[in-house]
């Protein structure tokens, strides 16, 4: 097998580009370890820091911009799709909207550091009609901050990274099995988490037909709309009679609900 260190040195920028691009597209790939190794290789003169930073930032933007325009064109439908396919159960749109509502475009500066928000932020920015120029400005700055941290870490500890790479090179083809096993283990954990999350949802779900039947009964349930204000603006449709409530204020907003009354909650 070709020396692993030589392989990384020869194709390092290509690996960085592909890894960052796939990560921003929503694939369960940890990009930070690759950036740390790339920072160490840059410190050893395999390629320049400028080339490394530009490559990673370009890949991040190439992954973000299509999502931005998809959100701008299709709005809440893109967000719903992301929520369905997200491999992280807690990366559902609901948990990231409040960040964007509070901070607006500057939230893009730290989006890539927040699990789930990195994937949802670009289409959410488009759906909220954030202009392309501020989106591009803050996304570029955010990508630079996100890329620079592991690159600097790899540059500072390049001797230790080189030692680790040499140990992997000594393993020969076994190194690929180790790396592949780590990635497979990571993806497997996330897939199991998603499966358990969806199974839990199925056990407590009420279908549209069941809800219609309940609402036509003598004691209709209380229907609570816990979608964020952002989603309610993007998609003004709602279940007739539903009470809009913010999760943070649910107890105060629903003080007089009898304990024996059924409550149906729906979100995005």
Image: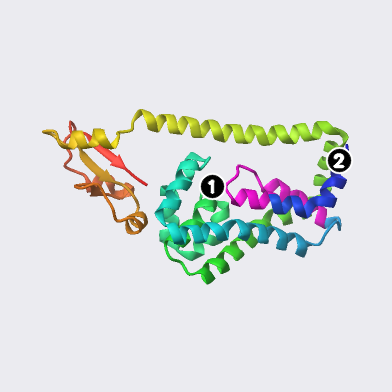
Which residue appears at 45% of the width and 52% of the height? 78
Q: Nearer the viewer, residue 219 or 254?
A: 219
Magenta stretch contains residue 188: no
Q: Is residue 80 left or right of residue 18?
A: left
**Which quadrant of the view contains residue 191?**
top right
Q: Is residue 30 above or below residue 214?
A: below
Which residue appears at 57% of the width and 47% of the height? 26
- In x, y percent, where is residue 204? 33, 30
Q: Which mark is residue 252?
A: none
Quadrant containing the N terminus in the rendered view:
top right
Residue 110 visible from this viewpoint: no
- In x, y percent, where is residue 149? 67, 56
Q: Is residue 189 left or right of residue 235?
A: right
**Which quadrant of the view contains residue 206?**
top left
Q: Earlier in the sequence, mark 1 or mark 2?
A: 1
Magenta stretch contains residue 38: yes
Overall secondary structure of the magenta stretch?
helix
The region drawn magenta spans: 19-42
Q: Nearer the viewer, residue 113 or 31?
A: 31
- In x, y percent, where is residue 23? 62, 48
Residue under circle 2? 166
Q: Secondary structure at mark 2?
A: helix
Which residue appears at 48% of the width and 45% of the height? 91
């Amino acid at each position: 097998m070709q020396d692993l260190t030589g392989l990384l040195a020869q194709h390092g920028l290509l690996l960085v580009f592909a890894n960052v691009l796939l990560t921003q597209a929503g694939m369960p790939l940890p990009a930070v370890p690759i950036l740390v190794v790339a920072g160490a290789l840059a410190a050893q003169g395999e390629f320049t820091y400028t080339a490394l930073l530009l490559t990673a930032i370009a890949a991040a933007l190439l992954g973000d911009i299509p999502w931005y325009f998809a959100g701008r064109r299709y709005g809440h439908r893109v967000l719903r799709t992301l929520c369905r396919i997200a491999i992280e159960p807690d990366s559902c749109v609901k948990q990231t909207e409040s960040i964007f509502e509070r901070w607006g475009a500057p939230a893009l500066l730290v989006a890539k550091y927040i699990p789930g928000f990195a994937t949802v932020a670009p289409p959410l920015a488009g759906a909220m009609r954030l202009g392309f120029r501020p989106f591009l400005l803050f996304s570029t700055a955010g990508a630079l901050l996100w890329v620079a941290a592991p690159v600097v870490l790899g540059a500072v500890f390049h001797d230790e990274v080189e030692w680790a790479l040499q140990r992997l090179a000594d393993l020969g083809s076994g190194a690929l099995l180790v790396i592949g096993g780590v990635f497979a283990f990571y993806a497997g954990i996330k897939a199991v988490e998603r499966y358990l999350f969806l199974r839990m949802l199925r056990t407590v779900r009420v279908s549209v037909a069941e809800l219609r039947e309940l609402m036509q009964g003598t004691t209709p349930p209380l229907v609570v709309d816990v979608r964020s204000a952002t989603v309610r603006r993007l998609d003004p449709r709602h279940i007739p009679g539903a009470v809009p409530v913010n999760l943070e204020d649910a107890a105060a907003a629903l003080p007089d609900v009898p304990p024996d009354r059924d409550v149906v909650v729906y979100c995005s």
